[in-house]
Amino acid sequence: MELSKSQQEILQRLKVRGPQSIKILSKHMKQTTMGVRQHLTDMRSKGFATQTKTERQTRGRPLNLWRLTKKGHQYFENNHTQTTLNLIETIQKLEGGDYLRNLVHLQNRPTQEFYRKELENTDPKLNSQITRLAELRNEEGYMAEVRLLPEGWLLTQNHCPIYSAAKHCSHFCEAELACFQQALGAQADIERVDHVLNGSRRCTFKITATNGQKSENF
């Protein structure tokens, strides 16, 4: 195994929370800072993690953070074969963008229907619906979580298991947003505010109620 269990936990933490200090990681993992430092040093030698530039603070010593490398992010990716990517490119060349867009949305319909049925069997309150949606995305490998905002909710996907395909065809992202909107229906407005294809670390969606529902604790 290339990474130990503790190193996999560090990898997961850096993926979900972004750059972290050794002190924060050791507190979260309930390990000594020396132990975490040794893990990170080994992960750096394997190409999974690296240090960010030193950040100066108003008090105390400059802060050194650790982040995932490209290899670290790729650790979470599903195995999308080159054949799939070649198929996308071939369809684009032979049939054009509109055909591919319609094909992606058609392929997404079973997922939309599945989400609709799952949410029908969930508490109708919007916060419960959003929580269930995040659970469904987690089951599909998106590492999703929900955060409460003063004016709504933030649905975050810390990993994109179809990134390779989406990078070649943004219609997957378009279909994703449409799927969320249909699942939650007219009771919510959904806006993508961070997008990995635009250089963000993760995709986030701001969700606001259209029927006066207030944000509630989960």
Image (cartoon, rainbow, N blue to C red):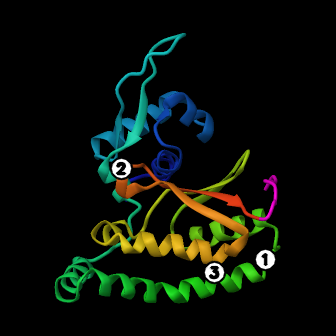
The residue sitting at 49% across, 15% down in the picture is 57
The magenta region covers 211-218
Q: Nearer the viewer, residue 2 or 114?
A: 114
Residue 53 is situated, as x and y percent measured from the top left of the image, at 34, 26
Judge whether 207 appears above or below 177 on screen. above
Q: Is residue 203 above or below residue 108?
A: above
Amino acid type at mark 3: Tyr
Identity of the residue drawn at 72% across and 78% down: 119
**Distance (Cα) linking label 3 and label 1:** 11 Å
Quadrant where the image shows the N terminus: bottom left
Please identify the residue farthest to the top as the structure is shown.
59
**Residue at image coords 42%, 39%:** 39
Instruction: Identify the secondary structure beneath mark 1.
Output: loop
Residue 20 in the magenta stretch? The answer is: no
Residue pointed to by mark 1: 122
Question: Is 212 part of what is drawn in magenta?
Answer: yes
- Would you place residue 82 above or below residue 14 in this image? below
15 to the left or right of 97: right
Q: Which residue is mark 2?
A: 199
The kind of residue on which mark 2 rests is Gly
* 200 with respect to 115 (left or right): left
Q: Residues within 10 Å of mark 2 (few under 14, many from 20)?
A: few
Q: Which mark is residue 204?
A: none
What secondary structure is found at the residue carrying circle 2?
loop
Between disc 3 and disc 1, whose residue precedes?
A: 3
**Quarter holding the C terminus?**
bottom right
**Secondary structure mainly formed by the magenta segment:** loop
Secondary structure of the residue carrying numbered label 3: helix
Q: Measured from the top left, where is residue 171 in percent x and y? A: 38, 74
Q: Nearer the viewer, residue 181 or 24?
A: 181
Residue 103 appearing in the image: yes
Left or right side of 146 for 49:
left
